[in-house]
Image (cartoon, rainbow, N blue to C red):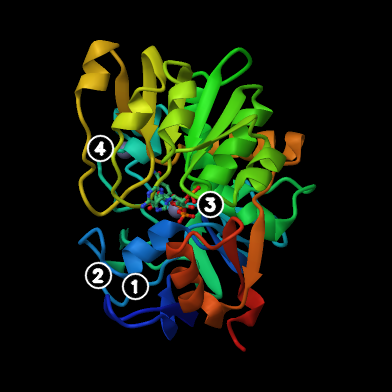
Amino acid sequence: MFVCTGYGTTDAATPLAPLTVNRRDPGEFDVEIEILYCGVCHSDLHFARNEWGFTQYPAVPGHEIVGRVARLGGGVTKYQAGDLVGVGCMVDSCRSCASCREGLEQYCDGGFAGQTYGGFEPVLQEPSKGGYAERIVVDENFVLRIPANLDPAAAAPLLCAGITLYSPLRHWGAGPGKKVGIIGLGGLGHMGVKLAHAMGAETALFTTSTNKTEDARRLGATHVILSKDEAEMAKHAESFDLIIDTVAAAHDLSPYFNTLKREATMVQVGAPDKPLPFNVFPLLIKRRNFAGSIIGGIKETQEMLEFCGTHNITADIELIRMDQINEAYERMLKSDVKFRFCIDMATLKG
Ligand code: NAP
Ligand code: ZN
Ligand code: ZN
């Protein structure tokens, strides 16, 4: 075991501050990564504040990690020292259940022990700690390669926000001839707009903000729909093939259901701490579907990174110092970020 400096919190109400993080020494198939950048996901905030009710403290968030390989176990074949690599929301899974064998580790029967943070570190026998830290040690099978043409800081959010939108867009067939709606222009949503557009879909943004129209169009949205404006919503009634909802707070889904075509699907990826209220009739009358999706498997995450490399897609980031994280959380709650905060880990030591 070795220790490094990290940033986290000891209870739900305390701001994040420096703390010491234990890491296992690299085992035979492990890669030790010097973390350069870590994106700030809304899940980090839900987790640090125990909004989902399963946080164990001390808690160190961060699952949009980009760094350089520093040390390797003797059995590692996929990476070499100095490689630019990424780690997302998973650092392990059971590897034997039907989902794992299909490359769908995010739906592992073994549950969430392999989460980058909020899981369980099997060697240290303690809750796993995330990427707001100097270093992390991960099995090579859960390490991703970052395409050389992408800016490493702006690529970090692809490891969660990117794959969380890429996977349902692919699964539900976004592409030419399809009209795809993304709800919410935050970290996830802005990746959804970019990716759906790059896949060739006619892309729309549903937003509660009046000041995001120009940005949404620049990112690839053909339509920008103010969701609180009933007349605007009515213009798009029964027109969408697919909608992906990225909203982090409880909100009424019924008005969005009415914009789906018959038998079309709305996919929930936003994970509010409170149940979502909705009227079932818009689902019943057009045999519409309401589904959920969580991140993506390791193979699909690498595929997404290659897609982003080919199409030159990264996140629009605001680079912050580690000690600005508490302020960043407050701004994220006000939707005041364009469109993802990313921590420059060189600032961790001041
Ligand atoms: P974010 O950057 O804060 O973006 C959320 C967006 O939702 C905001 O920018 C805002 O967009 C909209 N919004 C916020 N409050 C709203 C409200 N009360 N009513 C309607 N719209 C509202 O968050 P994020 O990092 O993208 O994460 C979004 C959610 O996804 C979080 O709950 C997170 O935990 C979850 N998540 C899920 C997965 C998964 O695998 N399923 C992965 C990562 C994150 P507008 O201003 O455009 O309305
Ligand atoms: Zn995330
Ligand atoms: Zn499994």
Element assignment for label 2: loop
Residue type at the position of mark 1:
Ala
Mark 2 Cα within 10 Å, few/some/many (few <14, many 20+)?
some
Indicate which label's residue lies in the foreground, 3 or 2. Answer: 3
Residue 136 appears left or right of 61: right
Q: Is residue 18 above or below residue 210?
A: below
Q: Quadrant of the N terminus?
A: bottom left
Is ligand 1 within 8 Å of the beta carbon of the residue shown at mark 3? yes
Residue sitting at x 49%, y 22%: 235
Indicate which label's residue lies in the foreground, 4 or 3. Answer: 3
Residue sitting at x 51%, y 46%: 188
Q: Tell me residue 115's x, y (percent).
A: 36, 54
Q: Say which residue label 2 marks.
A: 56
Q: Say which residue label 3 marks.
A: 187
Q: Tell me residue 345's x, y (percent).
A: 61, 74
Residue sitting at x 68%, y 41%: 219
Mark 3 Cα within 10 Å, few/some/many (few <14, many 20+)?
many
Q: Measure the C-alpha gap from mark 1 to mark 3.
A: 22 Å
Which of the numbered marks, if any, corresponds to residue 59? 1
Residue type at the position of mark 3:
Gly
Q: Is residue 262 above or below residue 216?
A: above
Residue type at the position of mark 2:
Gln
- For marks 4 and 3, the one nearer the N-term is 4
Q: Measure the C-alpha gap from mark 3 to mark 2.
A: 25 Å
Q: Measure the C-alpha gap from mark 1 to mark 4.
A: 25 Å
Most foreground residue, 349 or 221 = 221
Residue type at the position of mark 4:
Asp
Which of the numbered marks, if any, corresponds to residue 109? 4
